[in-house]
Image: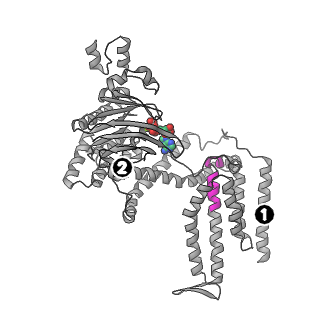
């Protein structure tokens, strides 16, 4: 079986070719600026003028769009509703829903926060789509990140796609033995139940196998390790990273200055 | 139950055309072995029989059912499919639950379920292991659990995907025994195998696939004699067959008995 062990999509693009650290700096900068910039429309502009065009540049727009509409939009939408209803700010009520008041201020506040979260998740999605996890980890460990940290990060990154792949094989096995998973919603919800046990159990077995496998390759060995893959890091990327850092500092400074 | 495949094509999302126009008819009660190199498309082909994969074009008929019109769960009442890797197939807490899962879904009467499960367990010699968690069993026994959980469904068509790969001689004999038993009951048995001796000893008809197409199809005796063509899909005839050929025997021999008889 061809299991997908990460969200990464292998394509030939400028974004794919960037050094992983540059990409990480880029998306962290975009997120930090969205959260700290004092200008109200920053997160909206970052999304429209940076994150979405970057997904096109990285040639992953269709996948990015799918994740954005199916996953991120509902999450951000939920956040928006919660904050719009339960944020006790502003005077002028523009909309009443039973005992809940919505004011112009709470609406604006909720919209920006939802947008910030949207930028955060979508930027990370973009990063995961264009970066192979093992490339990221080789690069970070080469720069001095301890292996244990790398392991924790990489297994976190992989847990979702792994669970997804595992769930799919189990569903295939159960349907092959007559379990009807395609009919009504209720039935479908009910058929998730027989899935939970094997999913959790199977994942635990996998963790053990993986621990044995990496130990067999000298994971805790004190000697310095060599890498089969050279990950290029041209000097102009260093300049980009510094520039991004400056932008973040500017944004934070502006925030402090104006508040 | 008859299987009719018409010009079947299949393309994976990666763009790889795994089946390039396959047409076959498998009659009710036939015992068929499918051979061919890794990646020839054997698994892809049989996954169409129970609807796990849908044809890109062409058609597959299971009896009078077009697989495009029936769900996997429905097709499960006609086609039992033993996965290549038991770890992808087993998910229950203990062997008994695992084996009961299929027949229960098919909504047989309680007595029939009990009877089918009992028979499946005894055929696979698992009767004393019903309470064990499948993951605590050795891989060879896990394979038997996978077999038992499918034959307990009592489907007219049973598919085994590489049942003997990685199994010891004792278990291979057990699997051959299960297949012989299914044959007696008049079931259609389709087995994918790399084990050419196993193929020669247990099957009447052999289909050789290569790169998504049918390379050879016919009685085992004829097919196993075609050394040169089989080599195209990296299949070697059984040693005795090759030895017989080198000795200049007139008939193609498949097993010890035939070999000794023609000497
Ligand atoms: N899920 C999948 N996604 C993409 N390609 C696949 C997938 N499964 C199999 N393939 C490819 O399809 C071809 C046929 O595979 P398969 O039917 O598994 O071969 P076989 O069972 O004969 O070894 C191979 O080239 C294989 O790499
Ligand atoms: Mg296969």
The overriding secondary structure of the stretch rendered in magenta is helix
SS for dot 1? helix
Please name whichever residue, A220 or B130, is drawn nearer the observer in this view of the structure: B130
- In the figure, B204 relative to A73: above or below? above
Q: Which mark is residue A176?
A: 2
Q: Position of residue B260 (x, y in %)?
A: 27, 15
Please name whichever residue, B176 or B39, is drawn nearer the observer in this view of the structure: B39
Please tell me whether residue A130 belongs to the stretch shown in magenta: yes
Q: Which residue is mark 1?
A: A247
Q: Position of residue B115 (x, y in %)?
A: 20, 48
Q: Position of residue B74 (x, y in %)?
A: 32, 52
Q: Are marks 1 and 2 on the same chain?
A: yes
Viewer-side label of 1, 2: 2
Q: How many tags in the picture?
A: 2
* Residue extent of the magenta highlight: A122-137
Which quadrant holds residue A118? bottom right
């Amino acid at each position: 079986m061809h299991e997908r062990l990460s969200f990464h999509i292998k394509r030939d693009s400028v974004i794919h070719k960037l050094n992983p650290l540059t990409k990480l700096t880029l998306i962290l900068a975009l997120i930090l600026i969205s959260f700290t910039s004092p200008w109200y429309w920053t997160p909206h502009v970052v999304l429209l003028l940076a994150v979405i065009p970057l997904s096109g540049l990285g040639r992953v727009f269709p996948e990015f769009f799918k994740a954005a509409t199916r996953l991120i939009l509902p999450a951000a939408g939920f956040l928006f509703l919660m904050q719009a209803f339960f944020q006790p700010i502003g005077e002028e009520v523009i909309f009443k829903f039973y005992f809940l008041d919505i004011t112009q201020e709470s609406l604006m506040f909720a919209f920006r926060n939802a947008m910030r979260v949207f930028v955060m998740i979508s930027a990370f999605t973009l990063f995961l789509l264009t970066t192979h996890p093992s490339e990221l980890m080789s690069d970070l460990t080469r720069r001095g990140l301890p292996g244990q940290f790398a392991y924790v990060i990489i297994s976190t990154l992989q847990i979702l796609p792994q669970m997804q792949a595992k769930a799919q094989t189990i569903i295939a096995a159960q349907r092959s033995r007559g379990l009807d998973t395609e009919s009504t919603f209720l039935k479908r919800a009910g058929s998730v139940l027989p899935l939970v046990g094997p999913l959790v159990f199977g994942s635990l077995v996998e963790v053990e196998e993986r621990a044995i496998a990496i130990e067999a390759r000298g994971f805790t060995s004190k000697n310095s390790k060599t890498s089969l893959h050279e990950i290029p890091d041209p000097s102009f990327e260093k300049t980009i990273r510094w520039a991004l850092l400056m932008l973040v500092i500017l944004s934070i400074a502006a925030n402090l200055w104006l508040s | 139950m008859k299987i009719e495949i018409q010009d079947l094509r299949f393309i994976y999302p990666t763009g790889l055309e795994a089946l390039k126009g396959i047409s076959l008819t498998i009659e009710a009660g036939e015992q068929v072995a499918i051979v061919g190199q890794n990646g020839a498309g054997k698994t892809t082909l049989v996954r169409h029989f129970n609807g796990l994969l849908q044809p890109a074009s062409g058609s597959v008929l299971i009896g009078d059912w077009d697989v495009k019109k029936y769900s996997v769960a429905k097709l499960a009442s006609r086609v039992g499919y033993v996965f290549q890797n038991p770890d992808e197939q087993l998910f229950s807490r203990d062997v008994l639950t695992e084996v009961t899962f299929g027949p229960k879904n098919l909504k047989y009467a309680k007595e029939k379920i009990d009877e089918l499960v009992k028979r499946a367990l005894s055929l696979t010699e698992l009767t004393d292991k019903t309470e064990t968690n499948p993951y605590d069993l050795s891989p060879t026994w896990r394979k038997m659990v996978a077999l038992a959980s499918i034959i307990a469904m009592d489907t007219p068509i049973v598919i085994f995907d590489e049942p003997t790969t990685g199994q010891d001689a004792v278990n291979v004999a057990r699997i051959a025994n299960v297949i012989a038993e299914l044959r007696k009951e008049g079931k259609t048995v389709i087995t994918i195998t790399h084990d050419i001796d196993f193929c020669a000893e247990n099957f009447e008809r052999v289909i050789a696939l290569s790169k998504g197409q049918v390379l050879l199809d016919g009685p085992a005796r004829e097919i196993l004699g075609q050394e040169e063509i089989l080599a195209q899909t990296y299949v070697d005839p059984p040693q005795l067959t090759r030895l017989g050929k080198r000795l200049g025997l007139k008939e193609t021999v498949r097993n010890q008995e035939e070999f000794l008889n023609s000497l």
